[in-house]
Image (cartoon, rainbow, N blue to C red):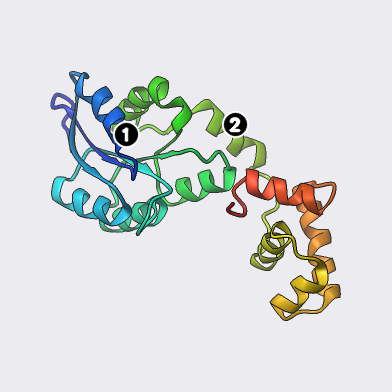
Amino acid sequence: MSDGSSPIRVLAVDDHPVVREGIAGLVRIQEDMTLVAEAANGREAIQQFRAHRPDVTLMDLQMPEMNGLDALIAIRMEFPEARIIVLTTYEGDVHILRAVKAGAQGYLLKSTLHSELLRTIRAVHAGKRGLSPEVSFQIAEHVSDETLTPAEGAVLRLIAAGNANKQIADQLGVTEDTVKGRVKSILAKLDANDRTHASIIGLKRGIIDP
């Protein structure tokens, strides 16, 4: 790890070359930073981390072959001191909480990259957390919410796919009354008006994927 006088060594992980180029351009003109490696997916990220041991890793969440969350978990298991900032277009609080629980020290929305990225790299390198104001608000807004059970999550995914209760019951191998009970619980936990509203909330918060 950098001793404070050496440049902060950065690894950029994103499956879009234009994003990596943008990060490289920003980092390159900073006197206190240097880009040591790039990766286009989670597997490459693990390999590059092992090879370069960067001070700070910028990790995209959605990537082919291996996603950023799985790569983050694998890197942190092998290198518990790894400092990783998650970059994503996803604003859902469930995605944020998963990444933070997995050990991410920072979480940035790609829409705020230019204004927040350099500040967050320096903060995380200094041992602080780097959560953008938007991200912090989303975590705070839902931190006390009751989480859906795996069974309720399965029902919500099928609701979002346009299935009626009977179809859901058939697919899950449960009774229609069981499905109705789970739907009622989902609506209460998500504070949703109806099934469609619950689907929209589930997608927005990252409880179910698009």
Mark 1 neighbour density, 10 Å: few (under 14) some (14–19) many (20 or more): few
| Residue 151 image point, x, y percent | 68, 68
| Dot 2 amino acid type | Phe
Name the residue beneath numbered marker 1.
18
Residue positioned 34% across, 34% down in the render = 19
Q: Position of residue 64 (x, y in %)?
A: 37, 55
In the figure, residue 83 lies in which quadrant? top left
Visible residue check, residue 131: no
| Amino acid of disc 1 | Val
Callout 1: helix, strand or loop? helix
Q: Earlier in the sequence, mark 2 or mark 1?
A: 1
Q: Is residue 6 above or below residue 76?
A: above
Foreground pick, 84 / 45: 45
91 sits left or right of 166 in the view: left
Residue drawn at x 57%, y 48% as measured from the top left: 94
- Position of 58 relative to 187 (above/below): above
Residue position marked by numbered label 2 in the rendering: 137
In depth, the one of 174 and 8 nearer the eye is 174
Residue at image position (80%, 59%) is 185
Which of these two is toward me, 112 or 73? 112
Rendered position, 65 above or below 24 = below
Nearer the observer: mark 2 or 1; the answer is: 1
- Could you tell me which quadrant the N terminus lies in? top left
Looking at the image, residue 94 sits to the left or right of residue 144; the answer is left
Position of residue 177 in the picture relative to residue 59 (left or right): right
Question: Percent position (x, y) of residue 167?
Answer: 77, 72
Q: CA distance from mark 2 to mark 1?
A: 29 Å
Depth check, front residue: 160 or 121: 160
Q: Secondary structure at mark 2?
A: helix
